[in-house]
Image (spheres, grey):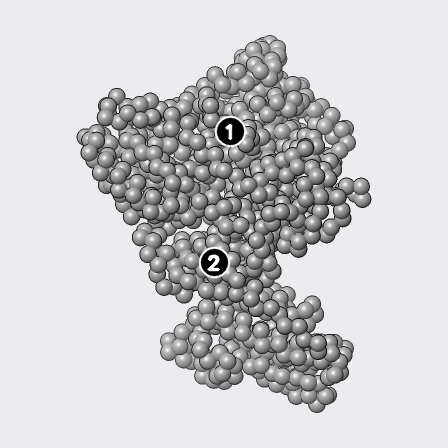
Amino acid sequence: MAAGMLRFITCGSVDDGKSTLLGRLLYDAGMLADDQLEALRRDSHKRGGEALDFALVTDGLDAEREQGITIDVAWRYFHTARRSFIVGDCPGHEQYTRNMATGASQVDLAVVLVDARKGLLPQTRRHTYICALLGIRRVILAVNKMDLVGLDADVYASIVEPYRALAASLGIESVSALPVVAPDGDNVGLRSERMPWYQGPSLIELLETLDVEVAPAARFRLPVQWVNRPDQSFRGYAGTVCGGRVAVGDEVLVQPGGRQARVERIVGPSADLADAVAGQAITLCLDRELDISRGDVIAAAAQPAPIADQFGCHLVWFGDAPLLPNRSYLLRLGTATVNARVTAIKHKVDVNTQAPLAARRLELNEVGYCNIDLDRPLAFERYADDRTLGGFILIDRQSNATVACGMLDFALHRAANIHWQHTDVDKSTRALAKGQQPLCLWFTGLSGAGKSTIANLVERRLAAQGYHTYLLDGDNLRLGLNVDLGFTAEARVENVRRVAEVGQLMVDAGLVVLVCVISPFASEREFARGRFAEGEFVEVFVDTPLAECEQRDPKGLYAKARAGQISNFTGIDSPYERPTAPELHLHAEGQRAEQLAEQVLAYLQGRLG
Amino acid sequence: MQGLSHLDDLEAESIQILREVFACFRRPVMLYSIGKDSTVLLHLLRKASRPARPPLPLLHVDTTWKFREMIAFRDRVAAEGDVEMLVHINQDGVRQGISPLTHGSAVHTDVMKTQGLKQALDRYRFDAAIGGARRDEEKSRAKERVFSFRSAQHRWDPKQQRPELWQAWNTRIREGESVRVFPLSNWTELDVWEYIRREQIDVVPLYFAKERPVVMRDGALIMVDDERFVLREGERIEQRRVRFRTLGCYPLTGAIESQADSLDAIIEEMRASRSSERQGRIIDHDGASSMEKKKQEGYF
């Protein structure tokens, strides 16, 4: 008897009869109760049908019932005498790669549906590719609607053979195929009598007996999820073992730091345990006090996980807004959350053909191979070896939306070969020599808001008082350092990143830096802030209404933008995300630049040493 | 290596979800409805924080129409003393005299349950509310996330829900927003009962068959639990051997005739059962897709 539970997904489009197959599966497994069957009969009649429309069993939400499509992954539960099942119903529509990836991340097996009349379609290839990308190694191919091709064994063979080749080429290790007629139940619960040429098991029999036990990674890994410390007498590290086995007395390593300790106690759900294996939610107590927090990984001391901060990875993009290289996102891997930037899109993947295509951004439902940089190193595994320490999500810093999932491939060792060169003279020494406290004033606002004018006045006054200053003007930098950048969203992200880096170097040099860039996106301003020490970054929002900026139009740019001569102009056809909590908010309407400069100087009073 | 059993697997998954709440939220709460799912959830909550006490309180939104045996059970749980039990009653509803008998199930549920819950969440400013809902309970729940996102107005928008990959949950919210968390998402009704049996968990006695005073009303067997229940013309109270599959407000909860007076018998009955769990719940039948609408309005 197969132990435990089988989690699988079904993939295919509405036309393939996927919902019908699933409904029939639940029916044949005896999972539809009398009142549900009654509701099904009623609903089937309402739709004008005489026979039971099994698709109605699983189509849940009003919106999709009306549109006749399944818009999200739906999870269903059933059991037979031999096994319990959790099945995810994944919509097959072109734009729903996201849902397939979501469903596939939770399971070990996929049932791929094909319409016998149509054979292998681009979407069949797409579904199989996404399954393989998310680490599914076993597939059941259900060739449906066999009644519409005369229950012909040759038609069946002409689909199954090429599919096996396709699946193998994508990295699927095992394919089981069977012919079905979903509405009538042929080969769903019982073997079909109409297709004697098929001698194999029915779908339910296959599901009951397939061995999908994935060999758990041999090396012990526990991502620390929660530090349980109710009082001084107890300190335990709670988490779910994602690989290997741990026993009391084992030597372990806390990563990425690399401190070693011995396991003193394993607290299980009901009692203390002598050992624990992958899948168990436990709490570890160690023999010495270490500073361990959520996001650390406790690993077997003899077999530690690799550590890196730069990776090659596949990304599946979910966001409505495209992926912009160099924008800072939050990355969650295991239980750790860090800042991350995609530094390069090596190529995107045509999900229908797997052909690599050149790309500068990734749009919703696109898959790409990318390089990604983290702001601190993490313990990881290749996704192929460990889904928990190899699979991550990206979160938009502003909306908190989950905008991508990623699968780590391997570490890039560029960073490992470049070490920060220690210098004896540091920031505080340089600041001391100048007799000032360095900081960065970051002026943000629309074009024509008065950023440069105000900053210029402030700098003159500071210079007159003997401070060492430098004004970094966005326009001036675009004539030199940033001459290669345009005004698309991607280019703006990179522009601000470079300005932030230069500003940071200047602060490190001990200067008071005044930066004037529109910097329209909150994410990049947050990134810039993150480059500076606490208190060193002063965001100055020059808040001038668009109408006033447009009226001033010192460079004639608004007129050109309105005339359609320049595009991607902030405030006209490109957004400006207003700062929500700037250190200084200058309400510029009706104020002279001198008055606003006074406000900045007043803020700086006592802060420059 | 021997794999984990099906119940071990579900238990570990639920504990992991609960610990995620402990680690990622500032003001979490567990909604406690006294029923079997809440009872299992509380059991898991204690396991998740072992050997410490659960690091969050329970909240019972009392509609004032629960079975007396439920309230007695709740008070016993509270008396165990390891978790704080908050009880909230919508006093506006009490003042208006809202009753399922006179206002009907829709108004009563909205005012005493949905509005009451929102009041309590706002009052304590909880940012995560753990509930015992399961995806197998009802069609519209099949797509519910484990971490289900709610706006500052407590609204559930199917389009704003986040994809959930692996166990890499996205728990980030802004001030005022909140999540509902469902650690029992992947459990079925049968799993719940088998787990109760395995772990020998005490549940409200109403789940076990016994002679009880009931009235047949609108096709459902309603238990006469106190003197507020007024008989309609032609109705009479009979003693029947009944039990409940789900528990809620007594005038809105249908009993089933049953001989199952032990956990073994309940599980046996369920395996042979030909009707679904929520059939006894009157609120589900208020309109087509009524549960989906209630959810959008903020019902659990």
Q: Residue at x 54, y 46 (%)?
A: A388
Towards the viewer: B215 or A190? A190
Towards the viewer: A321 or A266? A266
Q: Quadrant of the C terminus of chain A?
A: bottom right
Q: Residue at x 35, y 61 (%)?
A: A357
Image vertical order of residue A357 relative to residue A236, above or below: below
User: Few, some or many C-alpha atoms within 10 Å of disc 1 (few <14, some 14-19, many ≥20)?
Assistant: some
Q: In terms of secondary structure, where does tag 1 sit?
A: loop
Q: Residue at x 56, y 64 (%)?
A: A416
Going by the numbered disc 1, the residue's amino acid type is Gly
Do callouts 1 and 2 mark residues in contact (Cβ within 8 Å)?
Answer: no
Any part of residue A71 in sight:
no
Q: Position of residue A1 (x, y in %)?
A: 46, 23
- Which of labels 1 and 2 is toward the front? 2
User: Few, some or many C-alpha atoms within 10 Å of disc 2 (few <14, some 14-19, many ≥20)?
Assistant: many
Any part of residue A172 in sight:
yes
Q: Which residue is mark 1?
A: A4
Q: In terms of secondary structure, where does tag 2 sit?
A: strand
Q: Which residue is mark 2?
A: A312
Residue B197: image quadrant is top right
